Amino acid sequence: MRLDKFLKAARLVKRRTVAQQMAEIGAVRIEGRTCKPSSEIEEGRVIEIAYMTRVLKVKVLCADEQLLKRPQTTAYEVLEERQVEADKRPW
C-alpha cells in the first residue's frame, strides 16, 4: 500500500493530498529515512510523522487497504509521541 493512502486510511492525516505534501517536504519518514508519497508500506515498518507541534512514531500493524476500511481493524501501534516547539522543524 502506498504511504499517502496508508496515512489517510489509518486516519493519521485527514486528506491524502495533505499526506502527499507532508512526505514531499520530509515530514514523514519510514525507518528513519525520508520517503516519497508513493513509497510502499508493509506490516512491521516504523513510520515517523512530524506534525506542527508533535512527532508521532508508529509501527504498522495492517497495510491491507480493504481491512483498513473496517472500523474494528487496528492499523498501527503508537511507539512514541513527543512534543516539539511550533517554530522549529523536528527534522
Image (tube, rainbow, N blue to C red):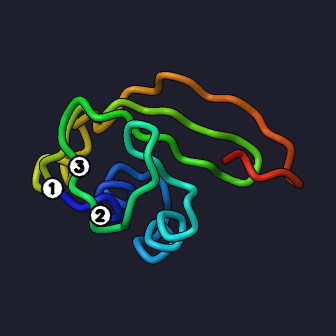
Q: According to the image, label 2 marks what residue?
A: 5
Query: Answer yes or no: do the residues labelled 1 and 2 have beta carbons within 8 Å?
Result: yes
Residue 68 pos. (x, y %): 21, 49
Residue 81 pos. (x, y %): 62, 28
Tell me the CA gap for discs 1 and 2.
8 Å
Q: Quadrant of residue 72?
A: top left
Q: Which of the labelled discs sits on residue 65, or is there none?
A: 1
Indicate which disc, 3 or 2, sits on the residue closer to the N terminus. 2
Q: Residue at x 89, y 55 (%)?
A: 87
Tell me the CA gap for discs 3 and 1.
11 Å
In the rendered image, the residue lying farthest to the top is 79
Which-is-in-front pick, marks 3 and 1?
3
Q: According to the image, label 3 marks what residue?
A: 41
Task: State the SS at label 1.
Answer: helix
Tell me the CA gap for discs 3 and 2.
9 Å
Q: Please state which amino acid type lies under the numbered disc 1.
A: Glu
Q: Please state which amino acid type lies under the numbered disc 2.
A: Lys
Query: In the depicted view, which residue is nearer to us: 35 or 4?
Result: 35
Query: Answer yes or no: do the residues labelled 3 and 1 have beta carbons within 8 Å?
Result: no
